Image (cartoon, rainbow, N blue to C red):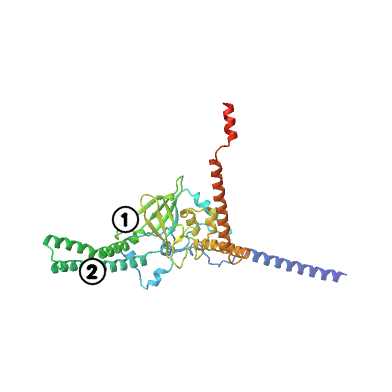
Amino acid sequence: MLLSRIGYGIRASTLRQTRVNILGLSLAQRFKSNLPEDFNPKKDLPTSGEWKHMKHHIPGEAEQKNDLKSRIPKFPLGKEAVPTLLPRPGVPQVGPKYSFRQVIQILKNKQKPELIYESEPHRLYFLASFCCSLVFTIYGFVLLEYAYFQANKDYEENEKELSEPLRKREWFISLIKYSSIGVIALAVATGFAKFPTRLIRRMWYLPGPVEHIKFTSYPLFPGAPTPVITLPLSSIARKHTARVWTGKGFYGTADNSMFCFVLKETGARSRNWFVDRKGFFWSDGRVFDLLFGKETIAEAEAGIPYDEQVGMVNREVERKRKELRAKHGFFYKWKIQAQDMKQDVQGATNYVNTLRGSKKPKSTNQINGKNDNM
């Protein structure tokens, strides 16, 4: 019996020791960190040079310059089409955490200007505008030179044998007639040259009792100050058929057919402003449909493109047409037209009968009754 007690004590002590080891191991695994032993949070922070480089990719942080270097694209040109802007920290996204209505409420409750858009560098736009402007400028001057040459030629030949005053008048008319196309070409060249001044670089939403929109563009000449335009939100809108939200891309604004969308001033000055679809958008493109499309929250949240809306109407019309064809047969159109004509004839007949009844002379009994009363 003594030996059995000794054996039981040995087993019990061994079991307790095993349990202690297992408990210690579990606690060590529970509180053990996965960080390396030499982990230093301050050491892993970006350096000043890295942070300076990173700021160029955060919307609203980089300095936008107006020098000539910022307008010249870098080769290869394919790099200029690659997006470089990161999502802005702190901007709510529509998803499981926030609904679209909550995102709009967050924007409306802002107490200070909120950056809602920033474009990618527009170097390719400047290159295309310069090339088109140069081509039309050359065409314009060549056509003007031809107009001057042709007018002088007609003046010298004088086929109609006109007098000197008439010859000068004909020379002036010929000069105006031949130079009209050259003037049009120079006007087109001027339009291409001024196109970058209609590109929006940054845009802010200004909250308040009267909501405003502030945005910046490019000056016409390098080195000039950045133009800043502030307008009431009610004075700028997008076109009815040009929706911002497409459901494609990171912000849902990508479109294979159009590289930008147009915002038009509706006030005294009617100007068009172009917004690149590859830039940074606050939350997503549906916010812009709400602000500039003057849509309701439900319409903007649905995000149905204009083409799809037309398609839905066409499908509904097609469905009703099939129902009418199944009900009235192949000649349902003529049958419905005949019914409409019948209703129109009946309505016209009733109207004529009503007019005849109102113009019918009074009966003799009614006249005699009036005489007796007198």
Place of residue 358 in the rendered image (x, y in percent of width and height, measured from the top left): 55, 41
The tag earlier along the polypeptide, 1 or 2, is 2
- The quadrant in which residue 135 appears is bottom left
User: Mark 2 packing: few (<14 Cα in 10 Å), some, or many (20+)?
Assistant: few
Amino acid found under the numbered disc labelled 1: Pro
- The mark found on residue 225 in the picture is 1
Q: Nearer the viewer, residue 169 or 232?
A: 169
Q: Quadrant of the C terminus?
A: top right
Residue 140 in percent (x, y) is at 25, 66
> Outermost residue toward the right?
1
Q: Which residue is mark 2?
A: 142
Instruction: Give the quarter of the image for residue 262.
Output: bottom left
Distance from disc 1 to disc 2, alpha carbons, whole Å, reads: 35 Å
Q: Amino acid at mark 2?
A: Val
- In the picture provided, is 122 more to the left or to the right than 169? right
Above or below, 54 against 346 in this view is below
- Of residue 226 and residue 20, the one placed in the foreground of this image is 226
